[in-house]
Amino acid sequence: MSAGVIYALCKSPAYYLFIGTYNRDKNKDGIYIYRFDPGNGSLQQTSSVSQVLNPAYLIPSASGHYVYACTEAQTPGAGSVSSFAFDPVNSKATFINSQPSGGENPVYLTEHNSRQWLAVANYTRGAHRYFAFHPGLPYAYCIEELSGMVSVYHYQHGRLDSLQRISAHYKRRADIDYSGADIHISPDGSFLYASTRASENIIVIYKIDQQKGTLTRIARQKTGGNHPRNFVIDPTGKYLLVANQMSNNVVVFERNTVTGLLKKTGNELKMPAPSCLQIKAYAL
């Protein structure tokens, strides 16, 4: 084996953080791209994208060569999906084209396994917000926006059977919109995290029963800002990053992989209305 091949095999991947925002003005930056260091949780901005309005939700493609974004979100009479080519060597995204989303408020999209299709969801305010599927067991978890509850399901042959419903908040009142927001499972499948906005602005941490799939609430963590609309666990599982939309900041937490608990790293970004975070590894 040549020295060049050995070097390529041993070289650590490069991690990029993609941030979508509500920029409200297409002449201002809407998408931010950072290099993420999984060694200490630090971030270094590499580029940004303007001339795009309210790219509120985005995803890198499975190949990593493209970034797709829900654009013109919360824009009357509009709503679109935009595509960008991403070059991890120079860390820049270049606009390709845009198509109507079929609704006025596109807020979620996903790429089909064939890599030939995108599905987009346009928001019309309801109780169910996001689903997370366990990485190795037949269980699914749903965060409900209005109730602030997490529902647990067993799934088989396309069928969902309800197992549990547990709160994602600590102050229960019937007249409050608990604003359940986002939900993710740790890469090892041991812990589930759910964010709630409104008056609490917390991430609730649950232990997942590996036999039953049910949840036990073990802790809560203040997000360091207002309105934690979205968060992401990095591919190594060592860090959790939160986008606090109303306080205009992204906060980096270190994640204890044994206990599931979170601790602030002191790393924080300031930007207008961050609403979506995605991290992808690239072999450069």
Image: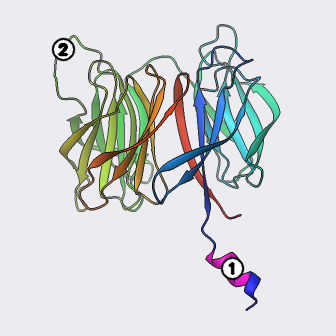
| Residue 67 percent coordinates (x, y) | 70, 41
Numbered range of the magenta stretch: 5-10
Q: Is the residue marked by circle 1 packed among few (<14), some (14-19), or many (20+) residues within 10 Å? A: few
Q: Is residue 161 visible?
A: no
Assign a secondary structure to mark 1.
helix
Residue beneath disc 2: 174
User: Disc 1, disc 2: CB below 8 Å?
Assistant: no
Does the magenta run of residues contain 43?
no
Q: Is the residue marked by circle 2 packed among few (<14), some (14-19), or many (20+) residues within 10 Å? A: few
> On the rendered structure, is 233 left or right of 122?
left
User: Quadrant of the image for the N terminus?
Assistant: bottom right
- Residue 52 to residue 87: above or below: above
- Residue 30 to residue 117: above or below: above
The disc labelled 2 sits on which kind of residue?
Ala
| Residue 239 percent coordinates (x, y) | 41, 51
Does the magenta run of residues contain 8?
yes
> On the rendered structure, is 7 left or right of 155?
right
Q: Of the residues under marks 1 and 2, which one precedes in the sequence?
A: 1
Residue beneath disc 1: 7
Q: Main secondary structure of the magenta part?
A: helix
The alpha-carbon separation of the residues under discs 1 and 2 comes to: 59 Å
The residue that appears at 59% across and 14% down in the rendered structure is 74
The disc labelled 1 sits on which kind of residue?
Tyr
The residue that appears at 33% across and 38% down in the rendered structure is 194
- Residue 228 to residue 155: above or below: above
The residue that appears at 68% across and 25% down in the rendered structure is 29
Q: Quadrant of residue 46?
A: top right
Which residue appears farthest toward the front when viewing the image? Answer: 266
